[in-house]
Amino acid sequence: MTESPRPYTLVAELTYRCPLRCVYCSNPVDWASHGDGLETADWLRIFREAEELGVVQLNLTGGEPLLRRDLETLVEGARGLDLYTNLITSGIPLTRERLAELKARGLDNVQVSIQDVAAPASDRIAGLKSFERKLEVAHWVKELGLPLTLNTVLHRDNLDRVGDVVALAESLAADRLELANTQYLGWALLNRAALLPTREQLDRARDVARAARGRLQGRMEVLFVTPDYYVDFPKSCMDGWGRRFIVVAPDGLVLPCHAAHTLPGLVFDNAKDRPLAEIWQTSSAFNAFRGEAWMPEPCRSCDRRALDFGGCRCQAFQLTGDAAVTDPVCSLAPDHGLIAGARRAALAPASRPLEYRAANPAPR
Amino acid sequence: MISLEQRPRLAAKARLRWDRKDERFMLLYPERGLVLNPTAADVVQLCTGALTVGAIVDQLAAKYAPQPREAVEREVLGFLTRMAERGLITPGDD
């Protein structure tokens, strides 16, 4: 067996609980069946074991990580290990005092999400009146001297306002703007008909983002996360399965990506039962899609197989029922017709109801 | 382009870390990391906001003697300009 790769980033999903109910939430649809199974000491041990494996970046996320009352202790522990600690948050619930305390404990960066550039549209997607509060939090971040990343998930109802999102990020003096096109998995897949934009919308938004990136160079980093329904080849999801990222879910399951535990047939280990290094290196789930041996055609003989690693396993499963096929977004994939069909549907304007994140999705 | 009179410092979002695993310096910033070669790490460690670029070049020219000062200056200016473009170094005032 070849030596396993070095992980650089630990994604700590501290809880799946969240006051928001975003219609494209990246937590699994059955999030409510995964409780907060890890104590403070468990997380601190996981951070230590991750750092020993080579991790240098820590994303504290969820759900809403602010709901963990031990967040201050976790930040302090992470900083003690010299991890670069990024809080990925909705900003709710938070006080200026608590944010100042998190900074004092060593927090490196705060990423605040906004769903749109004005309250009605943003609150509609979040399922909670929250927009004004988020802006206040973004101001606190800068006032306290913390770097600010602003994140907006893009979809057909806000893509035409990307220029306004950039302007808002500038007015907040954000250091980084993440324009993240919706990934159609989980809740977002349930809501795909309402969220998927047209190619024209995306092309315009990409041009706006590109111009902003040039204009703001050196002041604000502008990222435009690939909308993979409208590209010819898939993204290298998580930089490849079990290559760079470790995700630990609230119940302690150790995963190669946020949604891996939705894949049937894979057995994931719990961080409470085995050392992280052992799970990373030897667990069957982490090795299931590592390397190229698992690849079907057309991936197996494709020149791009070391660039995109066959795309996203969860997307392959959620669209085709088989996690081991080529990601259907690839134009060479046998199942690409599924994507072409969704694109065609996006051209037919129709208002469709949104399904909000809940304990259980409505039956279809 | 950064000038010899400016006093560069590390951007608020960036943090230097010694990577004991691969024995090198890394510059960490949100969701990214940059592996620094030893020369680049020397430059970054002097970007405290106290020293001018000229003073940084002086120190490194002494350290890397007998390399000509002009070569060191060219390298430092080029590196700092690229880092400023990426928002990882704040060029600072004259």
Image (spheres, helix red, strand yellow):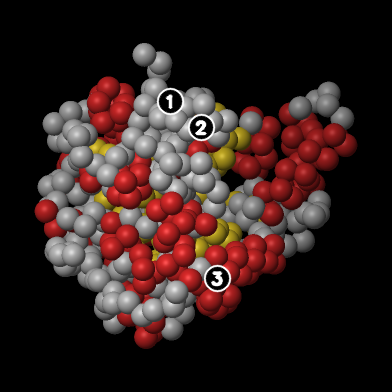
Q: Quadrant of the C terminus of chain A?
A: bottom left
The answer for how far apart the CA atoms under marks 3 and 2 are is 29 Å
Position of residue A256 in the picture relative to residue A169 (left or right): left
Q: Position of residue A78 (x, y in %)?
A: 33, 44
Q: Secondary structure at mark 1?
A: loop
Residue most extreme to the bottom: A120
Write down the chain letter for disc 2: A
Question: Could you classify mark 2 by the number of other residues whose Cα lies within 10 Å: few (under 14), some (14-19), or many (20 or more)?
Answer: some
Residue type at the position of mark 1: Glu
Location of mark 2 (residue): A305
Query: Same chain for the residues at labels 2 and 1, yes or no?
Result: yes
User: How many circles with numbers are drawn on the protein?
Assistant: 3
What residue lies at 43% left-to-right and 25% top-to-bottom?
A: A292
Location of mark 3 (residue): A201
Q: Secondary structure at mark 3?
A: helix
Q: Position of residue B77 (x, y in %)?
A: 78, 45
What residue lies at 35% left-to-right and 65% top-to-bottom?
A: A192
In this rendering, the answer to whether A89 lies above or below A352 is above
What residue lies at 46% left-to-right and 65% top-to-bottom?
A: A344
In this rendering, the answer to whether B41 lies above or below A65 is above
Numbered circle sitting on residue A292: 1
Q: Position of residue B92 (x, y in %)?
A: 69, 59
Residue type at the position of mark 2: Arg
